[in-house]
Image (cartoon, rainbow, N blue to C red):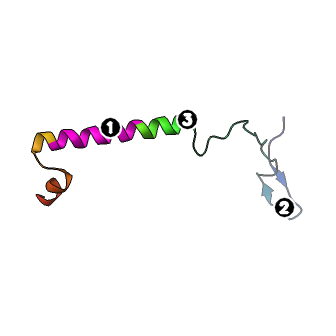
């Protein structure tokens, strides 16, 4: 078993001499994925419905509620 550290010519210990293995994913997890689009759509629907409920309960829109603060 390798310890993962070596001593260089100056006598200093180098703990990062062994490089970790790099894994390459087949599919990209960044950008416009189906999961991200569904999550953004659901959060937008929750926000829109909560604004409608706020307007029904208070009788004012979002700007009217902000003006009353």
Q: Tell me: residue 11, above or below residue 38.
A: below
Number of marks drawn: 3
Q: Earlier in the sequence, mark 2 or mark 3?
A: 2
- Nearer to us in this view, 14 or 59: 59
In this image, 60 relative to 32: left or right?
left
Q: Quadrant of residue 44?
A: top left
Q: CA distance from mark 2 to mark 1?
A: 61 Å
Residue at disc 3, secondary structure: helix
Q: CA distance from mark 2 to mark 3?
A: 53 Å
Q: Point out residue 20 in the picture as x, y percentages from the top left corner.
A: 77, 44
Residue at disc 1, secondary structure: helix
Q: Point out residue 13 in the picture as x, y percentages from the top left corner.
A: 79, 56
User: CB under 8 Å between callouts 2 and 3?
Assistant: no
In this image, 1 relative to 58: left or right?
right
* Residue at x 80%, y 44% (from the top left corner): 4
Q: Earlier in the sequence, mark 1 or mark 3?
A: 3
Which residue is the site of mark 1? 46
Mark 1 residue crowding within 10 angstroms, few (<14) / some (14–19) / many (20+): few
Q: Nearer the viewer, mark 2 or mark 3?
A: 3
Residue at disc 2, secondary structure: loop
Q: Earlier in the sequence, mark 2 or mark 1?
A: 2
Q: Point out residue 12 in the picture as x, y percentages from the top left corner.
A: 80, 60
**Magenta stretch mostly in which secondary structure?**
helix
In this image, 10 relative to 58: left or right?
right
Q: CA distance from mark 1 to mark 3?
A: 18 Å
Which residue is the site of mark 3? 34
Q: Which residues are magenta?
A: 42-55
Q: Tell me: residue 17, above or below residue 29.
A: below
Which residue is the site of mark 2? 11
């Amino acid at each position: 078993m390798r310890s993962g550290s070596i001593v260089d010519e100056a006598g200093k210990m180098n703990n990062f001499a062994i490089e970790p293995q790099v894994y390459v994913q087949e599919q990209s997890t960044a950008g416009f994925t189906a999961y991200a689009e569904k999550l953004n759509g659901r959060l937008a629907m929750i926000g829109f419905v909560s604004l409608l409920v706020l307007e029904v309960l208070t009788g004012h829109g979002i700007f009217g509620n902000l003006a009353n603060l």
